[in-house]
Image: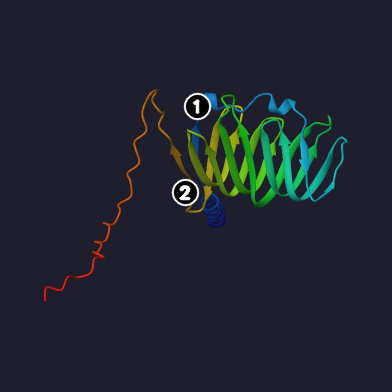
Amino acid sequence: MKAKARSRRASASRKAVGAAVLSALLTLSASAIAKKSDREQPMNYTAKSTEAFNAPNTISTLTGSVRITQGTLLITGNVAKIHVDADTQIARVVVTGNPAHIQQLDENNNLMTGDALTLDYDNINGIAILTTNAVVHQKGRGEFHGDKLTYNTDTSLITGESAGNGMVSGMFLPKVKPGAAAKPATPPATAPAPAHSSSAPAQDNH
């Protein structure tokens, strides 16, 4: 019995290791907080077809060339499901696409963009979960890649996860110093101009 118990524990441990993820907590500048007024704006959408409900505890489905806007927030994809909670608030927007896309301006009008196969956006708490081939770009700050990226628009915290032997990767851009001149681009090398032969006729000395 003890051997079986150890075996079960070892098996559970192997499963835990197999399901383990590599995580990175990447905190960006506080100035990257998304526009606070966005969630106070109406949410508009366009799609090829829709089954929409404006009632408590319902899910509206948008299909085909989906485009959802709310203030500076833009979400696009192939299929979107809009979840309305018991208080008739838009609680979640779940989008699939190739890719599903989200973008939003922060309070300094810097653009954040995110792409993944699936996007789960918590509209109440301002949290976007991007899953499968996920990438988040922040203008002037950096970019992040992983199997799953969770971006909190209120705190600018990104949590990255990568399953198996995969890796989370990111890049922080250096702060541009005031008055720093951009380095001039190096002109491409040009081939020397071919020598031109004279068009004058050869003189006959005879």
The one nearer the camera, 73 or 19, is 73
Identify the residue under disc 2. Answer: 167
Which image quadrant: the C terminus? bottom left
Q: Nearer the viewer, mark 2 or mark 1?
A: 1
First along the sequence among labels 2 and 1: 1
Colouring chosen for the image of the structure: rainbow
Can see residue 23?
A: no
Using the image, determine if residue 184 lies above or below residue 4: above
Query: In the rendering, at what x and y percent does residue 101 appear?
Result: 64, 44
Label 2 is placed on what type of residue?
Met
- In the rendered structure, find residue 29 and report the number of the disc placed on it: 1
Quadrant in the picture for residue 108: top right
Which image quadrant: the N terminus? bottom right
Using the image, determine if residue 198 lies above or below residue 152: below
The one nearer the camera, 67 or 201, is 201
Considering every residue shown, the one lying at the far front of the view is: 206
The one nearer the camera, 125 or 11, is 125
Q: Is residue 71 left or right of residue 62?
A: left
Q: CA distance from mark 2 to mark 1?
A: 23 Å
Tag 2 near tag 1, CB within 8 Å: no
Q: Residue at x 62, y 38 (%)?
A: 103
Can see residue 50?
A: yes
Q: Residue at x 80, y 31 (%)?
A: 89
The one nearer the camera, 61 or 4, is 61
- Using a 10 Å C-alpha cutoff, classify the residue at mark 1 as few (fewer than 14 neighbours), some (14 to 19) or many (20 or more): few
Considering every residue shown, the one lying at the far bottom of the view is: 206
Label 1 is placed on what type of residue?
Ser
Question: Secondary structure beneath disc 2?
Answer: loop
